[in-house]
Amino acid sequence: MGMDHVTSLRCTLCGDRYDPESVVYTCSNHEGVTGILEVEYDYDRVHDRFDAAFDGVVPSQWKYRAFLPVRDETEPVTLHEGGTELIETPRLSAELGVETVVKDDGHCPTGVLKDRASSVSTTKAREHGRDVVTCASTGNAAASLAGYAARAGLDCRLFVPGDAPEGKLAQPLVYGADVLAVDGTYDEAYDLSMAVTETFGWYNRNAAVNPFQVEGKRTVGLELAEQTRTDPPDWVVVSMGDGCTIYGAWKGLRESHELGFVDDTPKMLGVQSAGASAIHDAFHDHDDVADVADTVADSIAVGRPRNTVKACTALSESGGTSVVVSDDEILRAERTLGSTEGIYAEPAGAAPVAGVRKALAAGIVEEDERVCLVVTGNGLKDTESAMAATGGIEHIAPDLEDVTERYA
Ligand SMILES: *Cc1c(COP(=O)(O)O)cnc(C)c1O
Ligand SMILES: [Zn+2]
């Protein structure tokens, strides 16, 4: 019984440790939410508990229950997240000039990789006897949390920027959540959600500050390691907003190696938009770290990332790096991914394609390397940007002549 395989929550800034059974969000030694906590494990115990075969067959992320920070007796809140296919992408490879595979997490239940984290955090909320969950979100985390809250029978109250894509606002409404559109940016919505958490005691799912969130996201790394165990990629490419996803992916890949399940780890390539590049700027020691967020890729429109430290750890520990891409390059990437392989990603989900193009041109990725792109979100939630990416539809009269004119 209990959670013996989890040893502590350790502050990434000062190293102070906290009881993993307590509900703490960040280390109290630092101002605001900067003292991000890291969940630490007893890996001998994790290894003993993991009794499945590392054979490439992943029905859902709960195959890795032994790795997840939940009590043995807890029933997970799940909609069948994770277990997404690794897709061979020969036509995309030909288009980019490098061998690629795609991990399409647009197939997760609410359409985003974040479902992995929402599953874990609603499971934790229930474990701690909480009835209300909350988060701030550019859209996807809100929709994802709302779906899992509905599944778990929890009340869900969300803070989103008012200009989020409509599809991402409609979805949590259908899931029965209170959706409060904050008249301001994501960063302002975030600050408000933290104040609300403190005042009302609702369980907070915010990605960086809830230490258990990243732990769910790391199952994408565990899955990738398992699915590529006979043919590992040189690079894994992930877009970065707050930076939790890339760190989660890296932590899972690193653990698979440390536990001896795979021989090697890939390099991580983080991709940001030129209009929201704070992690990239921090990693490359740029003097003027931009704290504005202006990009078509709303899911990574983060001016003040909450997990820069962990994201930079993923880049440096893996021997990887980051690149920035323009909005035009992101929209072109969305079109490329859709038209070459039938994979419909939202802008932030397609950004890795643009990142690989950029990294190839810069000599960061070599043509004889193998690249795994993580598609983090489904395109159906944001059709407006898709219309911008494609130029929209053509109108014709309902007669054969109009068609003949075009194709004869
Ligand atoms: C949230 C999100 C990201 C970025 O994840 P972070 O953890 O904020 O870096 C990327 N793509 C999509 C589709 C997302 O929803
Ligand atoms: Zn600290």
Image (tube, rainbow, N blue to C red):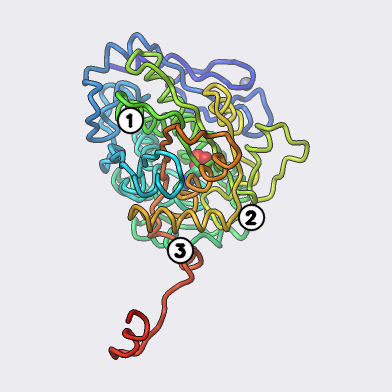
Could you tell me if residue 145 is visible in this image?
Answer: no
Element at label 2? loop
Q: Which residue is mark 2?
A: 294
Where 169 falls versus 213 (above or below)? below
* Nearest to N terminus: mark 1 or mark 3: 1
Q: Quadrant of residue 252?
A: top left
Q: Which residue is mark 3?
A: 386
* Nearest to N terminus: mark 2 or mark 1: 1
Residue at horizontal 52 percent and vertical 48 percent from the top: 354
Q: Crowdedness of circle 2 by 10 Å Cα count: few (<14), some, many (20+)?
A: some
Of residue 318 and residue 63, the one placed in the foreground of this image is 318
Residue 3 rendering spot, x and y as whole percentages = 34, 18
Element at label 3? helix
Element at label 1? helix
Q: Crowdedness of circle 3 by 10 Å Cα count: few (<14), some, many (20+)?
A: many
Residue at horizontal 51 percent and vertical 50 percent from the top: 299
- Check contact, mark 2 vs mark 3: CB within 8 A: no
Residue at horizontal 44 percent and vertical 61 percent from the top: 382
